[in-house]
Amino acid sequence: MIYRIRLLRPRTYHCCSLSIYFFISRKKYLIICHFRVSKKSRMKKVKLTRNEKITKTKTKQSENIASLLLLKYDSKLYDEDNTSQPTSCTAPIIPIEATRKKKKRKRSQISICLTNCRYESIRKVASAFGMREVSEEDAWNFYWTDMSVSVERAKEMKRFQRINHFPGMLEICRKDLLARNLNRMQKIYPKEYNFFPKTWCLPADFGEAFNYSKARKNKTFIIKPECGSQGRGIYLTKSLKDIKPTDKLICQVYLSKPYLVDGYKFDIRVYTLITSCDPLRIFVYNEGLVRFATSRYADPNVNNTTNVFMHLTNYALNKHSRTYVYDSEAGSKRKISTLNKLLLSQGVDLDRLWHSIDQVIVKTIISAWPILKHSYHACFPSHDMVHACFEILGFDILLDNKLHPFILEVNHSPSFHTDTQLDREVKEGLLTDTFTMLNIWQCDKKRVLEEDRKRIRDRLLQTNKFVEYAPTEEKEPEKSPWQTQIQWEETHLGNYRRVYPVGELYASLFQQPSGSLYTGTAASRARGDCTRIQREEFQQTKAKAEALKKPSQPKTKEGEKKEKDGEDAPLTATSVVSEKTRPRTRETRRKEKDDKTKLSTKSSPLQQPITLMQPEVKEEPVKPPYVLCSYEPDPIVEREERERVNLLAQRDFLIRSYGMLEQIYLVMKKMGTLRPEDERKYGVYGRLSLVANSTKKV
C-alpha cells in the first residue's frame, strides 16, 4: 500500500515552495510523505525569477526519483522475501538507527537479601549504594546473613551471586576448633605458632589438663563453652577438680599479666576482610574498637576470680556495670586510633606492634586454609565471574605486659550495632569501604543468565560437540575477572591495608600434611586406641588376679580323661596358671620323673647341650588359613574385625553429624512408611512426635 500526503499551507507574504521527501520502510508498507509549502505574498504577481525556475526543476526531478523507487520496491515486494529493503544508488536512504541518539548504558540495580540480618547499619549502607532489598526467593546479587553458611545454601547459588561467609570458616570461629587447629599447627611449627595460651579441649584432654594443674598450682585457668559468645558461661578457677569429665568445655591458661592502660585491662577488636580464599587475599581495617574492663585489674586470687568486670572485657557484660563510661577518649570503649596516640606517647614502636598483630591474624587464617580451599571448590565449582564469598572477621587480640599479641577468639559475625556515635563512625565506615572494595557492579546479572541459558541450550541440542576443532580468530588476550578484581582492590583500599599476600613470608606455613583436613578425627582415634589398650591391659591383670584367688578343685574321672586326651594340645595361659597353682602330690612327682627319663633316652647326648644353648623363640600367632571354597565363610581375624567395627562406628558418627538420618526419618514419618520399632529406636529427640501431631492436624 502506498500513501501520498500533500500539505498546502497558503500564506499572504512572499512566495516560495519546498518539497521534502521521507522514505520509511516497514516490512510491506512504504510511506512517502510529500510536504509542499507555498507562500504567497500580498504583492501582485511577478514573473518567476531564475532561482524559482531552478527550484521547480529540482522538485520535478525528485518526483521522478520517487516514482522510480516505488517501481523498484513493487518488483522486490513480489519477487523477494518480505524483509527486503529498497535500495538506490542515486538517492541513498539514511538508516533509522543512525538518526537515533545513543543512550547511555544504565547500571543494573543491585539487589541484596537481608532476611537473616538484624543490623540496621548494613541496611543503611546498602541503600546508600543503591541496593534494593529483596526476599530470599528472588534472584539477589548479595546475601548478608548473621549465621554460618550451610552446604545446601552454597550449592544453590548462581554464578553472579555472593554471600558474606565462607563455608568451613567455623574451623577458626568456634573456640574448640580454633584450639584444635592452633595446637596442630604448633606441633608442626612450634616457633611460629606461639601466640595463643596453652589450651585443652575437654573432655578429650581432661587428663592432661588435670595433671598440668596439679603440677602448677599457682596457675589460673579460664573455662569457656566450646561455641559460646558475648562472654556467656565464662569463669575463672584455680583448680579443675570441680569440672565434670564429661562436660564439653575449653580450658585455657589465664594470662595473668596483661598490658594495662590507666590500670584497666583491655582487648582490641581488629576487623579483617577476606575477599577470596584461592588465591588468599586478606585485608585489615586500620580503625577498630578497644574494649576496656570497668574495674581496676588485680592479680587473680580466690576472692576476685568471680569479678567479671575485672577479668573480662566483653562489651555485652561491661555495659551493665555502673562504672561504664560512654563516648569519650577516656571511655570504656575507644577507637584504635585513640589507643595508638596513647601508646605513641608512651614510646611504643607502633609499626612493630601492628606488624606482629598482622602476623597473628594471617597465621590464624592459614591454619584453616586447607579446609577453606577444599570447601570452596566443592561448593562453588562454576563461579568464574566473581568470587562467591567474602567475610568480615572480628579478631580479639590481647597484649601482655611485654606487648606481645595473643589471640583470644575469632568472631565470624561481629556485632554491627550502632548504639553510640563511636560505633556509628567505625562500623559504617568499615561497611562502606567493604562494599567499595567488593566492586558490586563488576558482574552483569543479565549477561550471566543469558550465558547460562545458552550453555543449557547447547548442551541439550549438542551444538558444541566439535567446538574444540573449530578455527578460532587470533584476538588480544582479555583481562580475566580475577585480574580486574585484584586491580580494583589495590586502587580502592579506602581505610584497609593489605596484609596478605606479602612476598614469601608465609610460604612455608602452607606446606601442611596432606591429612590436615581430618587431623582432629585422627587424634581422637589415636586417643581412643590408647584408652582401649589400657582397658585391655587392666582386664588382663584383673583376670590373672581372679585366677590366683580361685581355690584348687579335686580331679574327677572325667577331668583325668580330658587330660589324657589333651596331652598333645598346646598350653594356654589359663592352663599354665592352673598348673602352677595346683598342689604337687607324690603321683605328680613320679610322673615328672618318668617324663624326664623318657626325654633323656630319646634325645642323644650331642643334642642336649645344643638344645640348652638355643635361645627361646617367641611363638608368633599363626594366622588361620584362607578357605578356597566359596561355599564356606572366610576365617575372622580379630584385628581386621576390630578395624572394621571402628570404621563402621566412624561412618555412623559422620552420618549422624550431618543430620542425614534425622531428615530421612522425618520424611518417612510424614510419608507413613516408618516402622514403629524404628520410631522407638530413633526418636530424633522428640521431633518425630511433633511431626505426627502436625500431620494429624492437617
Image (cartoon, grey):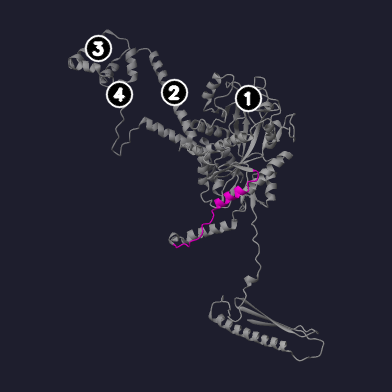
Residue 218 spot, x, y in % from top left: 59, 19
Near mark 1 (Cα within 10 A), the count class, few <14, some 14-19 or many ≥20, is: some
269 in relation to 549, above or below: below
| Residue drawn at x 51%, y 33% as measured from the top left | 185
Foreground tag (3 vs 4): 4
Tag 3–tag 4 contact (CB < 8 Å): no
Q: Which residues are magenta?
A: 470-495
Q: Is residue 447 above or below residue 177?
A: below
Tell me the amino acid under the disc marked 3.
Glu
Helix, strand or loop at label 4? It is loop
Instruction: Tell me: 533 left or right of 418.
Output: left
In depth, the one of 478 and 95 nearer the eye is: 478
Judging by the rendered image, the residue that carries numbered circle 2 is 534
Q: Is residue 387 left or right of residue 324?
A: left
Pair 3/2: label in front: 2
Residue 472 located within the stretch drawn in magenta: yes
Residue nearest the observer in this picture, 225 or 667: 225
Label located before the other in sequence (2 or 4): 2
> Mark 3 vs mark 4: which is more N-terminal?
3
**Helix, strand or loop at mark 1:** loop
